[in-house]
Amino acid sequence: MNIVILDAKTLGDDLDLSALDQFGKVVRYETTDPSETYERIRNATVVITNKVVISRLHMQRCPLLKLICIAATGMNNVDLDAAAQIGIEVKNVAGYSTQSVVQHTFAMALYLLEKMAYYDKSVKNQEWSRSGLFTDVSKPFFEIAGKNWGIIGLGEIGKGVAKVAEAFGANVSYYSTSGKNKDANYRQQSLEALLSSCDIVSIHAPLNAQTRNLIHADNLKLLKEESILINVGRGGIVNEADLAKELDTRILYAGLDVVEKEPIPADTPLLHIEAQERLLITPHIAWTSKEARVKLLEGIVKNIQSYFI
């Protein structure tokens, strides 16, 4: 069979893809522009895509295509209704990145909580050297223990964050964006109550009609002074222009691993705020630990095996 990988670069150059060779000829493209998609998949039996969109028209024009493997959990880049009607199987990989995302959540929280940007700069520009003091307490930080940690989206990743937050000694509560998740181990709150009562709020929800623009100018004002907002869910959940304005209005901290448009546009308000030391942005890497990407590839291999063998 012919296997086509459309955006291999998103999986990392360090990932050994040779396990796919057992199934047939593998053609690997580092990236794929939308204008190139059809030509690259027209003779494919299996297409592997992370973020490249596969439309109804693509599928209609590719009679050899049997299986689309999404190198991710989210499936919004494939027209699932069309695939079902045409008879093309679509498989994703769930749960591979949970530990990676949980870890990144705390990396961001601790970086912001302990004012790491400020202290790193203070040492490297020799302000500490000139101070004559063995320490520097000019930017006080706080412990997670005893603080209120609010979770928006108590799915598998949200529950993983809750367990670690509890291990730090935090009081954990949550808001269910769907209204369906119930967990007796943690206190459920309304969104407004959670935002106004928590010292750290982390977002682990999908982007859908219920969560788009969930965090905006009106409820950002509910956040406590010096609180931390972390989004490792999806861009579009937090209104970026509203967040930028709020960060420059008062003392808040924000850590974003996802933004509405990726890669982030140069003219986004977030890159032009004055309070840059209170904003941490990483380029959608929470899912990308080496272990997570190995699990992802293993999941893709299993999906191909389960369909054809």
Image (spheres, helix red, strand yellow):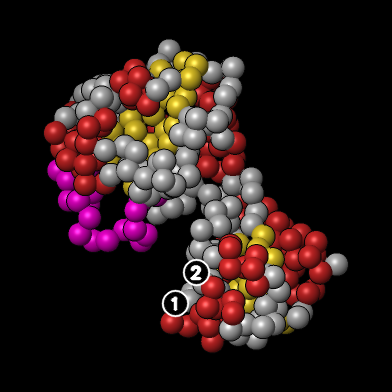
Residue type at numbered disc 2: Val
Q: Earlier in the sequence, mark 2 or mark 1?
A: 1
Instruction: Name the residue nearer the viewer: 182 or 244.
Output: 182
Label placed on residue 34: 1
User: Callout 2 environment at 10 Å: few (<14), some (14 to 19), or many (20+)?
Assistant: some
**Type of amino acid at the residue the image marks with label 1:** Pro
Tell me where residue 172 appears, x and y as whole percent: 48, 19
The correct choice, above or below, for 115 with respect to 55 in the image is above
Q: Nearer the viewer, residue 74 or 110?
A: 74
Q: Position of residue 125 (x, y in %)?
A: 21, 43
Residue 250 in the magenta stretch? The answer is no
Is 248 in front, or is 215? 215
Residue where numbered disc 2 is placed = 53
Left/right of residue 249 with respect to residue 2 in the rendered view: left
Q: Is residue 243 above or below residue 77?
A: above
Q: Residue at x 52, y 42 (%)?
A: 101
Task: Identify the residue at horizontal 46%, vertical 34% (top origin).
Answer: 177
Span highlighted in magenta in the image: 258-277
Instruction: Pick the quarter of the image with the C terminus.
Output: bottom right
- 218 in relation to 300, above or below: above
Residue 183, position as x, y percentages in the image: 58, 22
Image location of residue 285, percent across then percent down: 47, 51
Q: Main secondary structure of the magenta part?
A: loop
Would residue 71 appear left or right of 175 to someone viewing this image? right
Are dots 2 and 1 in contact, CB under 8 Å?
yes
Quarter of the image for residue 74 reads bottom right
